Every structure is written in structure tokens, then in C-alpha cells.
Image (tube, grey):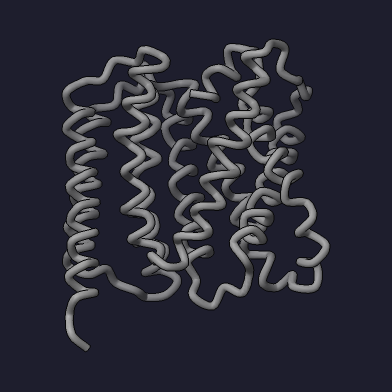
Amino acid sequence: MFSRLAFEDGLTVSVVVFFRYFLPCLVFSYCFLGLLRRWKHAFPFFACGAAMAVGTYGYAIGIRDMDIAMAAIIFFSFPIFVTLFKFLLFKSRPSGVEYITLGLILAAVALVAGPVDLEQVPLSSLLITFTAPAAYASVLLVVSIPTNQLLPIQSTALISLGGLVGSILLIWIKGIGFALPQTQSGWMSAMGLALIATLLPNLLLSLGAARAGPLRTAIAGTFELPVTLCLGWAVIAEPVQLNQVGGSILIILALALSVHATREKAELPD
């Protein structure tokens, strides 16, 4: 929603990514000096932030070139990337219930996306949009490491710094000029991107992910899909189609199944 408003104000995708990370980085700047001596613990979070800048750029391209629902459902495939990364890096296989929940998410992706008309959606835009769930999955893995020795505010600051550096590199690589918002709506969208869409969720993610683990955090995060569709319908009048409603229901079923399985596991005697 904020990205669409920023595009209407004339901001480019790379500049939109910059505004997502500049203010959070400024807010948490007091943390950086103390982290210099702990760079080995800090670097993975910084690297994930840089990856998120690329993923945010890819997601913004998707929002620009296709329906919000299509871009959103691609992003909400991130639990699959979490499972893949866990297996490749840690040889960790999902449980039977996790296979079912991932299957429901895959079905939701297929249902909402449907057949893709490449004449309407450029293949390059479709592929680069998948950098968003891949980058977010890497963040979930890093912030969920039980041996993480950083405070949530510190990890959020490092992710913001990585995102800021990554966005500056994107602007430099694309060879475009830097433009400030020109209207009140543009500045409001930039502030919304920084505070509501980046700083607050990243901080809450750092607080919760270490307790929930990467895959359960990923499955829980897919509940954002119904919220996205409702916001698209209520705020910018994007029509919600029947297949999108069906995909949202499958996502909610996957979340409910995951929560139920977690509760049953917690209630089992030692």
C-alpha cells in the first residue's frame, strides 16, 4: 500500500527500498558502536539485512508490475524456502504435520496465482519477486538461532543497517538519481514504509522468532496474506477474487494446524 503511494509520487523502486531502511537505521544508530567488537555475531544479521534489501526490491518490482495478490502470494511461499534452507544448511527434515502445512501453503500459492500470462506479467519481474521470500527465509533462520547472543534491538539495528547499505548499492548499480518525495502523500508513504512496514515488524520478529523457531514463525507469518488482501480491497480498491479467498482459507488452515500441533507437543508428558 505504501509502495503504491510512493510510486504515484514519482519515487523509483530503489529509492522506495532506501526509505524502508533509512529511518529505522537512524533510530537504532546508537547500537552500532557497541557492536563493532562483536562483529562475528553481528555480521550474519547485517548480511541478512542486505539480502532483505534485494528481496524488498524484488517485491516492489512485483507490486509495480503485477496485482498485489500475485506479488503477495509469491512472498508468502517463504515457509517453503525456510524448510529448504534448514535442510541444506542443517540437514533438518520437517515433521509430518509440517509437510502437511507446507502442502497447504503450496496449494494456496497455486490457487491464488493460477496460470500466469507471461504476456501480462514479464518473466523477469516474476522471477525477481521470488528473491523476497528467499531473503525473508534467511532472516527467519538467523534470528531464530538459539545461540544468538544479541538483543532484539541490536539484531533489528543490524538488519536495518544491512538493508540501508544494500539499498544504496541498488541505487548505485541502477545508475539512477536520488529523489525525495514531492507531496505530503509521498512523505507519508515514506514514513509508513520506514515505521509501520519495516521498523516495528522487524523488532517484533526479533522478539518472537527465537522462541517460536524459524518454521513455526514462517507458518504464523503467512496469516499476513488475508490482511494483505483485505487492505488491498479496502484501501486501494483491488478486487478480491474467489480463488484468493480460497487461498487465504488454506493459509489459515495451515496456521491453525501448526498451532494445534505445537500445543499437543507442549502438552505431552516428559
147 and 114: which is toward the camera: 147
Residue found farthest to the bottom: 270
Q: Residue at x 64, y 58 (%)?
A: 153
| Residue at the image position 29 percent from the left and 15 percent from the top | 239
Front-most of residues 52 and 24: 24
Residue with the most extreme right position: 33
Would residue 26 be found to the left or right of residue 197 on screen?
right
- Residue at the image position 63 percent from the left and 69 percent from the top: 150
Above or below, comparing residue 52 to residue 207 in the picture = above
Q: Residue at x 69, y 37 (%)?
A: 170
Residue 176, picture quadrant: top right
The quadrant of the image that shows the C terminus is bottom left
Q: Position of residue 152 (x, y in %)?
A: 59, 61
Left or right: 34, with 80 as reference point: right
Give how far across and how far down residue 42 sits, in percent. Answer: 68, 66
Q: Along the horizontal axis of the image, is 78 left or right of 147?
A: left
Up-down relation of residue 85 to residue 232 (above or below): below
Name above or below for residue 133 compared with residue 174: below
Numbered disc total: 0
Q: Is residue 9 left or right of residue 145?
A: right
Q: How far from the left and from the top, in percent, is residue 57?
A: 57, 35
Residue 215: give x, y in percent of width and height. 35, 61
